[in-house]
Image (cartoon, grey):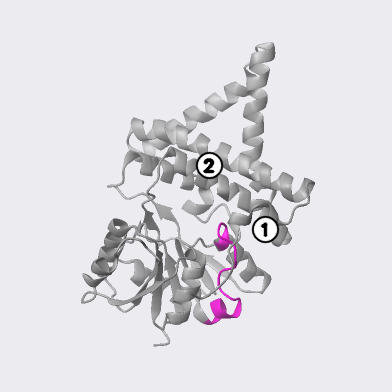
Amino acid sequence: MSNLISVIVPVYNREKELYELLDSFAKQSDKDFELLIIDDGSTQNLINTVSEFKNKLSLLYFRKKNSGPGLSRNYGGKKANGSWLVFVDSDVIVDKNYIKNIKSEIDTQKCDAFGGADKAHKEFSPIQKAISYSMTSFLTTGGIRGNKNPVSKFQPRSFNMGIKKEIFEKIGGFSDLRIGEDPDLAMTLWEKGYTTAFFDTIAVNHKRRINFVKFSKQIYEFGCARPILNQKHPSYTKASYAIPSLFLLGFLLGTTEYWTVGKTGLLLLYGIYSVLIICHASVKNRSLYIGLLSGITTHIQMFSYGWGFLLSWYRLNIKKLDPKEAFPHHFYIKNDS
């Protein structure tokens, strides 16, 4: 089984999304893989959903105490039989050639770990498509998730990534970070001399079950995580990570300028940027409504990430707090329960 691919899916509840994910794997053109469902202490009964696919997939189901997705992935890695571990989130849908394309890519590209992009399925809701646009467009900070061109070294993300099992074991799997654990793993790989690659044939449809408020909270946490990662991996710190914070500060400065002296110079630039986002998203999605929603989600993304980054940078670099003291909810105690 040395060439076997083991797909690992940590899941907490999300019964409907899990069914859609399993259904998409059951329709794979290449069925030579195993699929491990790691039930992270769900309150919903997922076993009935899993049982529906036992005759359609090489399927393993494990239930454990709740610990978060990172440690659940580590748990799955220990149970897997394959030489390659592929991690996907429970709220994605994969295309029918997903496994086939992974095998083709790893046969032609030498790497120790890989990742792919995420996209929006045509049946997703308008807000899901708008959030997907903000998270993947080259006009936002999400461009890294949508394609490989903006980056020289690709950081695989845990919603769609693969890694050789032996290397995953050598580095100890995912760390004790609850948020930002996937870029943390990528940079740990680089520091130890391993290579990562972007596979542009394995994008997944990421069905984020989310609204504006939840999206803002999620992106805020991502912003808080980045200075922690910068401190942990200083060699891979980039000035571009501060762009959302500069965007936020510029907007506040422009608003202050308008109310104090009546000038609209800075705010005009933000207006032009908003129109550009709306037009581009409208054309891309063939919907003005999604374009307008994308204008909102893009500003939520920039403001929320920017504020989280600023707060975290202040606590770590000005107040000199330890990351676990500054953001205790960003970490967990590692265990294998």
Which of the two discs, 2 and 1, sits closer to the camera? Answer: 1
Q: Which mark is residue 233?
A: none
Place of residue 178 in the rendered image (x, y in percent of width and height, measured from the top left): 55, 60
Q: Is residue 118 left or right of residue 123?
A: right
Residue tagged by mark 2? Answer: 140
**Residue 28 visible from this viewpoint:** no
Disc 1: CA contacts within 10 A as few (<14), some (14-19) or many (>=20): few
Q: Is residue 42 left or right of residue 229?
A: left
Report, in whole angstroms, how far the alpha carbon at label 2 lies from the one at label 1. Answer: 30 Å
**Residue 291 visible from this viewpoint:** yes
Q: Nearer the viewer, residue 13 or 19?
A: 13
Q: Nearer the viewer, residue 21 or 160?
A: 21
Place of residue 175 in the rendered image (x, y in percent of width and height, measured from the top left): 59, 68
Q: Main secondary structure of the magenta part?
A: loop
Give me the residue at 52% from left, 62% from top. 156
Residue that protrudes farthest toward the top in the picture: 262
Range drawn in magenta: 166-181
Residue tagged by mark 1? Answer: 324
Q: Nearer the viewer, residue 148 or 300?
A: 300
Q: Magenta stretch containing residue 215, yes or no?
A: no
Q: Is residue 212 above or below residue 262?
A: below
Label 2 amino acid? Thr
Q: Is residue 202 above or below residue 321?
A: below
Give me the residue at 57% from left, 50% from top. 222
Give me the residue at 67% from left, 25% from top. 253
Q: Are marks 2 and 1 in contact (CB under 8 Å)?
A: no
